[in-house]
Amino acid sequence: MTDCQSITDPKMRTASVLYLPAGFAEPAAVQKLSADCNVQVKSLPAPIHRLGEVQTSNIEPSGLLYLPEKYVVPGGRFNEMYGWDSYFIVRGLLQAGRVELARGMVDNFLFEIENYGAMLNANRTYYLTRSQPPFLSSMVVDVYGAMQKSGKNADKAWLERAYADLNKDYEMWTHDPHLAGQTGLSRYYDFGQGPPPEAVKDETGFYKKVAGYLFFHPAQADDYIVRLQPGVNQPVAGSAYSMEVCDVQLTMQKPACEAAQQFKLSADYYEGDRAMRESGFDVSFRFGPFGDATHHYAPVCLNSLLYKNEKDLEQISRWLLRTADAEKWKARAEARKKLINRYMWNSEQGMFFDFNFMTGKMSSYRYATTFYPLWAGLATAEQAKALAANVQLLEHPGGIAMSAEESGTQWDLPYGWGNIEMLVIGGLRQYGYNADADRISYEFLSMVAENFRRDGNIREKYNVVTRSSESHVELGYEMNVVGFGWTNAAFLELLHDLPKEMVERLEKEQNQPMPAAK
């Protein structure tokens, strides 16, 4: 945090403020940043031990949360250190030999857990109510492995600190309100209420589109619409909307209209919306329209990650010679695997699906997270065979699409994302399906390279059906940000694992003249 631009928040467009943990002495680097960049430095009002302890609306103006080490941001409007983005960025850094920078980013997450209560969505004050998919244990294991390979002495003190903090973060995910009912599995959950401020200010008109959609699709609206009654006080957060039904105007005469109906989105809708944002998949229709029922599901992705956490903590325990702890984590992982198979595996379709614990029913929404159990190593050989056979359901000329449903949002068909390509391909390789992994890698790499030659940049997502970086998102967050951290990482890692002859073929293709524009 020595660059003036590191404090700027493109999402909120407010004055630059840097917040330190309560009682934390102002470091010399921060004093210099304050003087050089005209940055206001404040302290948080109280120590934070866990998410939800502070009302983020009381922290005004919003600002950046201090982190002690350098970090890599995703790019564009995402000008802070993000939770799940950073796992893929760390993978890219390790691939490039930047072990110290990767370790510094892990140290920042440990600092977040110790001072801000959890691994955060990102280090902004308005994210103090939620986390993001728990990839931190994977970062720790990968960085520690890279430290060992580099010939440096294994830093057991660092590993001890990481183990304690990972324990704390794991406890958050495995206790209420992150529990998925009585399933023994976990769910996404944000401790805040009402519309998140960054969405209100940065995603202009999003909630109006949601309200309009739900109004015209009452069968999908559940309890997400609250009609406002004149003279009745209804304490529901968020903006009010109005809907008026009129005759079609066929003459100069003013058309007759029914009285306008005023309504708001309900508190339960915003609870689901915030949970969707913790999932990282904002926005898709995987958990209902606009992800409005995310908090009602035990997701395949989250519970696969928690299985991976348990296996990673088992490994770390063995490195630290904590045999009893290792056995405890091994048992927890086995218990979770049984629950995932019980609630989420559909043997007829040969895929994993999310489980709605409110209705007691498995989802039928085909989504790329069905391959997470391969990446996490919890799938059986038989399940892996079925999943590999079903790759074609989501595979397109540019790689794996997020879903089989075109909802108009960015985390559904026709879009593919570098981070998910990494997980799907890594999972296939782990179970020996290298031909599938090579083919999908080539599809994605050649698409990214082709668009880079034409546009001169790397994007956060691609239309894998048309093999284009042009996006036409109709609902929700609409931009296609240039940067981009996890796409860069995916390119490095997938290229590294590609057979030599395919790398040479890719290079030859990219050396050909670009086709003339039509």
Image (cartoon, rainbow, N blue to C red):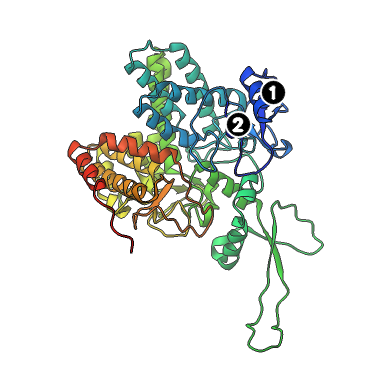
Seen at 49% across and 52% down, the residue is 287
In the rendered image, which residue does mark 2 sit on?
Answer: 4
Query: To which residue does mark 1 refer?
Result: 22
The mark found on residue 131 in the picture is none
Up-down relation of residue 150 to residue 303 (above or below)? above
Number of callouts: 2
- Taking depth in this image into account, of 485 and 226 the one nearest to the observer is 485
Furthest-left residue in this view: 501
Residue 379 visible in rendering: no
Q: Residue furthest top?
A: 153
Q: Quadrant of residue 17?
A: top right
**5 or 61, nearer to the observer:** 5
The disc, 1 or 2, on the residue closer to the chain's N-terminal end is 2
Which residue is found at the position 71% from the left and 88% from the top? 253
Residue closest to the eye, 269 or 498:
498
Quarter of the image containing the C terminus? Answer: bottom left
Residue 479 on image: x %, y %: 50, 52
Q: Circle 1 — which element?
A: loop
Element on which disc 2 rests: helix
